[in-house]
Image: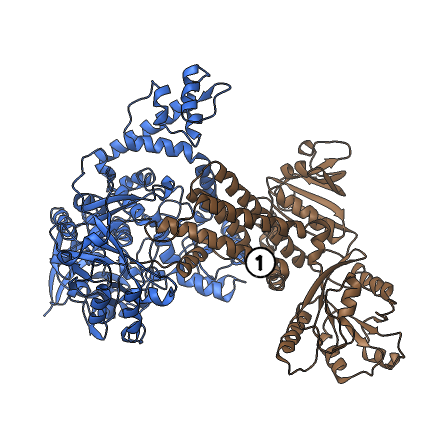
Amino acid sequence: MTYIADDVDVIVVGAGHAGCEAALATARLGHSTILFAINLDSVAMMACNPSIGGTSKGHLVRELDALGGEMGKNIDKTYLQIKMLNTSKGPAVHSLRAQADKKRYSEEMTKVITSTPNLKLKQGEVIQILATDGKVTGVKTATDSIYKAKCIILATGTYLKSVCITGDYTVNSGPCGLQSANYLTDSLIDLGIEIYRFKTGTPCRIDKTTVDFSKTDVQTGDEKIIPFSFENYGKDILREQLPCHLTYTNANTHKVILDNLNRSPLYNGSIAGVGPRYCPSIETKLVRFADKERHQIFLEPEGENSNEIYVQGMSSSLPEDVQIDMLRTVPGLENCEVTRIGYAIEYDCINPTQLKLSLELKNVEGLFTAGQINGSSGYEEAAAQGIIAGINAAMKIENKDPLMLDRSDAYIGVLIDDLVTKGTEEPYRMMTSRAEYRLLLRQDNADMRLLEKGHDVGLIPEDRYKRFLHKKQVISQEVERLETTHVGTKPEIQDFLRAYNSVELVSGITLASLIRRPELTYEMLAEIDKERPNLSEDIVDQINIYFKYEGYVQKQKEQVEHFKKLERRLLSSKLDYTKIPSLRAEAIQKLNEIKPTSVGQASRISGVSPADISVLLVYLEQVKRKERE
Amino acid sequence: MENNTVAAISTPVGSGGISIVRISGSNAMHIIGKIFKAKNSKDMSKAKSHTIHFGFIFDEDKIIDEVLVSIMRKPNTYTKEDIVEINCHGGIVPTQKILEIVLKYGADLAEPGEFTKRAFLNGRLDLSQAESVIDLITAKTDLSRQSAVNQLEGSLSHKISILKGKIADLLSHIEVNIDYPEYDIEQLSIASIESTVIQINSEIKSLLTTSDTGKILREGISTAIVGKPNVGKSSLLNALIGDQRAIVTDIPGTTRDLIEEYVNLNGVPLRLVDTAGIRETEDIVEKIGVDLSKRAIASAELVLFIMDNSSPLSKEDTSILESIKSKKYIVILNKSDLPAVIDFSVLRNFITDAPIINISITESTGFDILEQTIKMMFMSGQIDVNNDVILTNVRHKNALHKAEESMDNVLDNIKLSHTQELLAVDLQNAYRYLGEITGESVSEDIIHSIFSRFCLGK
């Protein structure tokens, strides 16, 4: 028998990385929230690789932090190793990556959630979305309890009708042997939502006491650690770090795999879901890149108190005996014991073009989705959508405009715009190459780009905001000082320049101009710049980047201006494109389906041509003038 | 979006004595100041609105054409923006050259119907004209899409797509190094980037030189030479270009590939395609040639149909005539040195709407008449080389110019020891400029290239 169990503002379904950020956002914004997990021991579980960040994903975590999210703080508490990647390249593509202690990551996140006011964490399977007249009213759980809510955020990850496959063994289960959610998909279909079926996978875990690490290369973290959270700058978060290890496949490994290809569910037709290009199984790698003699295998610890090692590079759905045989051909793994076998997982998700840029479904008011249900992959991509869905559910309840980041604001903006405007045929992974304004969207300036917005929506507390304003002021004062402080051709200056192989001066020049020289930095100039204030490292970084990147940043800012003009030409969601004469049939169909919010978004829809955009502009002008008449 | 400066040839090319290149937008006066010197040395930036000036268009120091320039300042102009119109001498070559110079100095090539669109958006045209503005945009777009498709089969755009492929290879390698720094993928050294960029850039530059000035003619009126086997098609081609480009033998079916050559015939640029003899064939290689010929006819703007004056009118001849009926064509009776077998009056009854010319390729007679006939057809406007074909060509060259600039930037920045993600910015621009022709998106292309070339993933 059904009964009314509770009545709250927001219900979040799924307590993974998207769900946690979403629930924390709504609760922190003062809205009573229930967060449902299918199993309470799986909060913020890292079902696949034990790491957070990496290229572009590290950027997402930084952005999340600047908006008031939790992921950055949580990984700072629970990392096993931190590394800044790409330091041989410029600051725009520097990326933080951490190995995480999986268990502690989950525990720490659970602590934060259970100590947050307005937020209840519950175990339960949501089986139905309740809605009247296209507007959500609540959810029903498997135990027939009804929870009423104004907004619902679905963050179901890979649990919807999930099936795990290892060789010819198939089981209806979620990741890591957790129960799957077998009813919610049907409820979504009843609401008129289009469902996709995607596939991903995970490699074996092995017992570290059975690995001979002497046959592998050691990979250590950075000696000097940069935290993920801007809040942890200047704080001592350095701990003893655990190493990772690198080894390689060889001809024997490849022979085992290729000899057993007919037993792979990927190649014998039993897996139908669409898998990601960037996350291929080892068997797919061998088939697609037959010439490659060896493939890298990274051995990553799963936790300080765990004996398990994650075998990155060996993702597979081959039968168990084949997986074990292939592992044991790898140097260092000859005697390894497998603790958990690798599997492929298929799951239901939605076609993300059914969403608004706020992550609310276009045709179901009050229903938001975030994370893998939207066709993305990755913890960071999920968390980034989670906070946006959470903020926008809160904005909706408060009758305020949603927070929509655009492609020039943040990687989060690129991620959501790509999903919502272009859709995706495979699980979507963030990449720096996807961002048009990569030099502006750096991990070092995520706070400069987004903290103000986080403060506006109410997730950044006043004290943090004040510290941020102060940082901004210090930077601009120092930039100003460097631009206006001149140095002459004094012998000490010329000596200094000679020492750094820099061209000597023929006349006076500003300190700023010296920093612009490729061979000099702000730090080097200390000896000829005695007046300088004592600044923290992150501020020094900002100043160096400001001068070194100036020309490029200026150019990209001009491009952004150009881009924004079309973004500001708003389109009503009520616009019926069949009524616009001369749009091509394909454009009409796509525009009616996506219902873009701006002419800019319309121009990015595949199948909408520049001529269609011209027609649209003429039409808009026509409507505007008719209204004036 | 609406305030960039655009330019286009706004008169039909080739038919009139005078052509007009129109520039509209806030940068129009600046551009004309850079490329035009008035005879009376007047500074155009100070010239009064709605005045006309006599002088010369320069490309840096070189005089390109003697022109009249009209200066019209906003808001009392067609687009309500600053407009400059350059009245130049009507041929394709000078007009196209002037447009290219205007683009080089910062204008964008106008989209189809763009001036009228601006006129409307800026409130110059009234509401009742909106529909016709839309019709203009879509009609012109269809036309230019059609001609773009034609041009895509052309040699220049083929070369551009090869260049694009090379840039994509380089860029995807740089990008994969950035996005997958820990994979065992070769880290590109700056030196190897530099040498690849130099190599690609020299190809861009040579492509630009070969398609420059006199050789702009390379994209002239596409002309197909057709006829049944061994009537003298290749010989005609060779005679027109003056060397032995095609293999000439007495064996029917020798020409199996399409052979393209470019000639300047009395100021009329022709792109000549010598086609394999059209006839039913069993030979597979030759069959490919014959299929190509049919495609060549379909995309040709002028067809030269050769017949052998010394053998009777055959079924093959009449079926060729049938297939070129909808085209502008000239019938050439070759081997006029041999006794005539074809009865001219019978033929004339058959062909009522095209010139028929007698020539002998072996004795070099009749060529002057052929040249004059083609010129007459061209100059009297009988052949319509439409604007859009010319524009598509300008678009390609403009794209190449901008790509060249971007590649030059890459090389400059390597000298300034800039890192790879910065070099990627200009490489992406170069790729984007070349991609604008066919409308691909950089990011999707490069990501696709990354995953098809490199083995990545957990």
Q: Is residue B374 visible?
A: yes
Q: Nearer the viewer, residue A456 or B208?
A: B208
Q: Is residue B1 visible?
A: no
Q: Amino acid at mark 1?
A: Ile
Q: Which chain is brown?
A: B
Q: Is residue A253 above or below residue A112?
A: below
Which colour denotes chain A?
A: blue
Task: State which quadrant residue A439 falls in.
Answer: top left
Q: Is residue B238 above or below residue B49?
A: below
Q: Is residue A318 above or below residue A622?
A: below
Q: Nearer the viewer, residue A408 or B140?
A: A408
Q: What residue does disc 1 label?
A: B134
Q: Position of residue B305 (x, y in %)?
A: 77, 73
Quadrant of the drawing holding the C terminus of chain B: bottom left
In the image: residue A79, left or right of residue A455:
left
Q: Residue at x 69, y 71 (%)?
A: B297
In the image: residue A67, left or right of residue B9:
left
Q: Chain of mark 1?
A: B
